[in-house]
Image (spheres, rainbow, N blue to C red):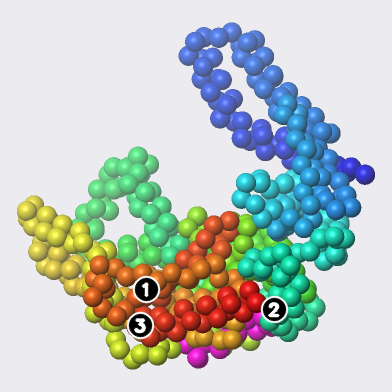
Amino acid sequence: MPKRLHWLLVPITVINSLINSVFIFVILIFIASTFNLPKPILFGLCIILALLIIALPIINYFKTTYALEAQEFSFKTGVIIKQARHMPYTRIQSIERIQPWYMQIFKLVELKIETASQDDEPIVLKALTIAAADEIEATRNQRQHSPIPGQVEVLYPQTTGSDTHEAMVKQPTTPNPKNDISYAINMHELMIYGLTSLGILPGISILFLLYSHLSEIIPKHFLNQVNQLVVKNSVIAIVALTILAIIFGMFLSLLQILNRYYHQVVTRNNNTFSISKGFFSKTTVHFDQRKIQGITIEQSFLRRLFKLYTVKLFISGSDKQEDANDKSLVLIPVIDQLNLPVVLKNLLPEYEFEFNQLGRDNAKSHFWNFWRIGWLWFCWLPLVLIPIYYGWYIPVIIIGIIIIITCITVWAWLDNTETKYAIFADQLNIQNNVFMTKKIFLLRANKLQLINHHQSIFMVHGNTHHLDFVIREGSHAASLTLRYLEANENEKLQTWYSQQVLSENK
């Protein structure tokens, strides 16, 4: 039987629309004053706009329904353009709960239902009671784990046709986790995570932007006095302003991190994961463990001092992301090095977390190769000679060059020492360094799409290769690279992969 969303969606939508339409009302008033429109016409336009803002959510509320069918979830909506969508439970990739602060007051949630296809827009139920959301998730879990007559689910794409049953019998067995395994984030570690985040840079940028507009807000005589004081105590003033800018940026970064990851709890029940987090806007994400394509464990340069790591997941079919530059789903934002293997072993017993086995077969150093490639990122370095033409202080330029050389040297040293790998029966762990961030990738053999080895123009006459491991990331492919592998290491890794493919196709 079709069901409706919660009736409080109407006033919530009306209030949000009125807030978003303030700019339109301002434009109408500006046009009316510019062209001397009669006040009755202006009032009439404003009333019509207000009536539309109120009427459309009411009509849309009665036109929007959903139903929990036997094998699919159906959703109908639309006033001018009507839509009717039918989503089989087996195609549901993840269900995400979003709960802004104003919905927390009325104990309502917004539910976002996504499929594995990048072409399908998610179904968004904008206002549901918690009981209704629980019913949808329970129905989806029940239908996904119950077999459908005549349908065989193939989890490993290398297997097709009549080989399906035989290959599933040969799949590696892994221990089943106990029901309701949970992990809650440590608030002390989260505070350190926020203070060591590169999110301080936007905060510093905001501070400099405000400073550039001070002349428009603060009286000129006061600014002149401040400038004179800074000139008299230039060194102390510059150091003090720099410290204040860094503190301000760290404070904004901390607030952002706390709002995003406050009270994050990860729960696993059989194959279903649940991640809940947030302060002002609470979100809860549900996904199937079988959608995990790989695990990333990373440690930024600053967090090495505190021995803290971040754990992310490669999820197939859905472009989940925490920021615009990263499509991975954050499983654990921050965790101590000592607790890392224990917690991950409980949550993901399908994977091996023996990090002490990471290493190289050859002790030969490739520091020079990494150092040489590092300079390609600074090919614009001769541009520092331009300030000399304008009479700028040459020691400042020399100091800048020294800093750049030091950064490239540290970068190359980290690249050389942190390029490692470890081979297990059906899993490959690789480690590399990306912009001074140590990253460990845990890859199951049956999730690898392909591997590819290549050489740059500097390696044509040598015995070293780059090796790419391709897995699914969201609805696209991700390439993870081990650089400057010796010929025997390259052959060893490719042989391992070939054996895994052959064993799955038997």
In this rendering, the count of numbered labels is: 3
Q: Is residue 471 left or right of residue 263?
A: left
Marks 3 and 2, how far apart in space? 31 Å
Residue 440 at x, y = what percent? Answer: 49, 78
Point out the frontmost of discs 1 and 2.
2
Q: Residues within 10 Å of mark 2 (few under 14, many from 20)?
A: few
Residue at position x 46%, y 78% in the image = 494
Viewer-proximal residue, 196 or 437? Answer: 437
**Which amino acid is tagged 2?**
Gln
Residue 81 at x, y = what percent? Answer: 72, 29
Residue indicated by mark 2: 171
**Which amino acid is tagged 1?**
His
Q: Residues within 10 Å of mark 3 (few under 14, many from 20)?
A: few
**Which amino acid is tagged 3?**
Ala
Residue 218 can be seen in this image: yes
Residue 381 at x, y = what percent? Answer: 18, 62
Q: Which residues are magenta?
A: 344-358
Q: Is residue 356 magenta?
A: yes
